[in-house]
Structures are given as structure tokens and as C-alpha cells.
Image (cartoon, rainbow, N blue to C red):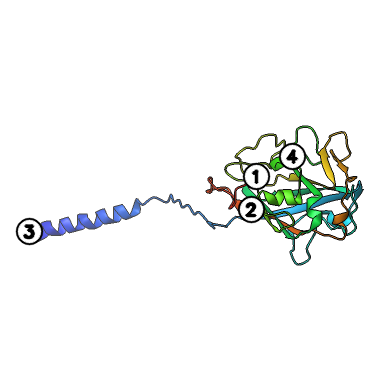
Amino acid sequence: MKSILFSFLTIGVVSALAIGASQAFFSDSETSAENTFIAGSLNLKVGSTASYNGSPVAASTWDQKDLDRVSSEKFFNFTDLKPGDKGENTIVFSVDNSAWMCAGLEITQNSNLGKYLNLVWWIDDGDNIYESGEKALYGGPRTIDGWLALVGTQAGGTGTLPLTLADSVSNWTTWPAATPNTLAIPADTPQHLGVGWCFGNLVLDESQPYGFSCDGTEDQNDAQGSSIIGNLSFSVIQSRNNADYLCPEHTAL
């Protein structure tokens, strides 16, 4: 009996050695390195091209950038207007991610000039002229008093006119803006907003240099020495995962 048991033990030892000797030398490994989550950005940059009575206005012309409220870049800064004066400013803006965009015209000081200074907005193709295929937005032109009347402000008063440039109901920012769409502003695609003004009666007329005429012949003596001061602001919000966004005071006039 001892001899048999010993033989079994011997076989077992040999088997263990055989298994150890037959292990494979092939090997493999995979590594997914430096997995990263980085938050995206949403940055609005605004530029300006301005002219007054047909001449460039250097102080109101700059390349797209982040506006600094402290240094107060001004789209309009005129201190000696006469009836019949007119000008045009093309505001160019872009975002680095698709976005909705709201704007607001806040008038902080207004007097008799508000009933004579007319303003018209349109989506421009980038040539700074109102022309065929472009549409005057929100039913303009109107006087400053006329614009503020849309939100219930009395003549000569102050207030804020909210403007919807792009939200889930209407987007006027893509040229031509004959009909609004419901798409967000695309990333890295410059958009142009034309703003024309006239101290007098503004009439859209594509045969004129700006695409509109300005008649200042009516009696406007009570506007002497009066002034209008205001802020024009723009805000953007991401469109992705925000498909139903509406500007806080949606205005599709």
C-alpha cells in the first residue's frame, strides 16, 4: 500500500511540473489615457462700422471684440446734430458656440429730440446699406418716441425696448431676413445688424447712398439743445439642450 501511494504522489508532482512548463508567453494590454471633460465657452464678440453724413466715424468703428462697459465703446456719439443729418452703423457680431440672442434699447434720457430722431433696423449682408432682399425689422422706421411707445412709454419718456434677434420662435439674424426662421445663430459665423438714423423724416429708398433718405425741412426748433442718451445691449445663451428658449421679453413685432 505504501508503494502505490508513493507512485500516485510521484505522478502528481510530475503533472504539476508539466502544467507550469506549458504556460503561454503571449500577452496584451489596453489603456485609455487622459480621459478629459472640458467645459465649452460661449463668448459674444461685437464690432462696429459707422458713418455720419457719408463720412466714416473712426471713434465708432472697431473690430469684433468683448465690449468693455468701463471704457464705453459707443455706436453713436454726436453732439451737434442738425435737421437733415443722418448716419448708419453696422453692428457685426459672432459667437463661438451656437446660441440664442436677445437685445435691448434702453433710453435713459429723452426730450424733444425723441420725436424727431428716426431709427430703422435691418439684417445687413455686410455692405452697410439697406437694399433689396433686406427687411426693416419690427415695422420700422420709427422715431425714438415711437419705438418706446411700443412698450407703453409716453412721448418724451424713458424706458427699454426689448428686441428678439434669435430665439426658438423667431430668428432675424440670418441674411436675408425677409422671413424669420427658428434656427440658432451658428458658431463662428459673423452676423450684421444695420442701424440707420435720421434727424427728420426717414424714408427707405434704395436709390439713396444709405438705402434711405432723410428730410429735415419741417419745423423742429423745439429740439434745439435737447438730447437722447441710451444703452444698446446684447446677450446670448446656449442653444444646445435649450431648444425652447424665449428671450425674457420676446418681441417679434
Disc 3 versus disc 1: nearer the observer: 1
How far apart are labels 3 and 1 at the CA level? 93 Å
The mark found on residue 185 in the picture is 1
The amino acid type of the residue labelled 3 equals Met
Q: Earlier in the sequence, mark 2 or mark 3?
A: 3
Q: Residue shown at 74%/39% (left/top)?
A: 136
The amino acid type of the residue labelled 1 equals Ile
How far apart are labels 2 and 1 at the CA level? 10 Å
The amino acid type of the residue labelled 2 equals Val
Disc 2 versus disc 3: nearer the observer: 2
Q: Residue shown at 76%/43% (left/top)?
A: 141
Q: Residue 99: x percent and y percent?
A: 62, 48
The mark found on residue 136 in the picture is 4
Disc 4 versus disc 2: nearer the observer: 4
Residue 122 placement, left or right of 198: left
Residue 205, placed above or below residue 20: above
The image quarter containing residue 130 is: top right
Q: Which residue is disc 2 drawn over?
A: 236
Q: Earlier in the sequence, mark 4 or mark 2?
A: 4
Q: Are marks 2 and 3 in contact (CB under 8 Å)?
A: no
Q: Residue 68: x percent and y percent?
A: 74, 63
Q: Are marks 2 and 1 in contact (CB under 8 Å)?
A: yes
Q: Which residue is disc 3 drawn over?
A: 1
Disc 3 versus disc 4: nearer the observer: 4
Q: Secondary structure at mark 1?
A: loop
How many other residues sit within 10 Å of disc 4, few (<14), some (14-19) or many (≥20)?
some
Q: Earlier in the sequence, mark 3 or mark 4?
A: 3
Q: Residue 235: x percent and y percent?
A: 65, 55
Q: Earlier in the sequence, mark 2 or mark 1?
A: 1
Q: Are marks 3 and 1 in contact (CB under 8 Å)?
A: no
